[in-house]
Image (cartoon, rainbow, N blue to C red):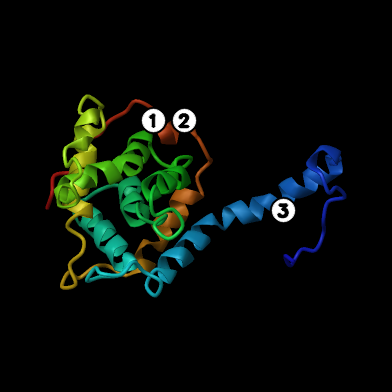
Amino acid sequence: MPSDARTVSFTAMKDGTRADYLLLRELEQPFVAATAERLLRELARQQEETLGGYQVTRLEHALQAATRARRDGADTDWVVAALLHDVGDALAPNNHDRLAAEILRPYVRDEVTWTVAHHGIFQLYYFAEHYGWDRHAREQHRAHPCFDNTAAFCERWDQSSFDPAYRSDPLESFADAVRTVFARTPYDPAVLRTGAITPLPVAS
């Protein structure tokens, strides 16, 4: 039971009163406000519970990707996206890209969400032939305005971030950026900037 033990009167949503739903809205606000903290805890957990076989943990992969983005001069949206792009691995291994994108969607530019949502198919370019798959599957999106940024995201920050010798920045150094992003007003048009495409910064 949550620390605030107040509860609604209904057992079926259709029977709820105005007072019930005002209570739920009141209790939802601090819960939503803590989204960044839950995401940071989930990332930290991936230091221990991780996908086997790689030379680094899922947390270290995320830190390397975000560190590379930061060192390239990427803005906050891109850095946080690089940090969280695989956050769905544990719960949605077959569509982790889409899960991560939906977590980010209300809070970052549309172009960033599109990149995270499609990075899985773009990553096939690096390994698909070893499984008999089509490494060029991303070509179906060639005409999309976000194609080049997504290809660059994968080349510079994702596929290259499995190096145990790379000196990544610690998770704590990204915490304020994550909190800043998830403190934004959800679906603010000024944040989403629908239709705007900005090339990634030139690699350092």
**Crowd band around label 1 with a 10 angstrom C-alpha radius: few (<14), some (14–19), many (20+):** some
Going from N to C along the chain, the mark reached first, 3 or 2, is: 3
- Circles 3, 2 touching at the beta carbon (< 8 Å): no
Residue drawn where x is 84% and y is 41% of the image: 16
Distance Cα–Cα, label 1 vs label 2: 6 Å
Q: Which mark is residue 189?
A: 2
Please state the horizontal and vertical placement of residue 162, each as a whole percent of the image.
Answer: 20, 64
Residue 150 falls in image quadrant: top left
Going from N to C along the chain, the mark reached first, 1 or 3, is: 3
The amino acid on which the numbered mark 2 sits, given as a three-letter code, is Pro
Mark 3 or mark 2, whichever is nearer to me: 3
Please state the horizontal and vertical placement of residue 123, each as a whole percent of the image.
Answer: 22, 47
Residue 201 falls in image quadrant: top left
| Mark 3 lies on residue | 27
Residue drawn where x is 44% and y is 49% of the image: 181
- Circles 1, 2 touching at the beta carbon (< 8 Å): yes
Looking at this view, is 181 or 54 the one in front? 54
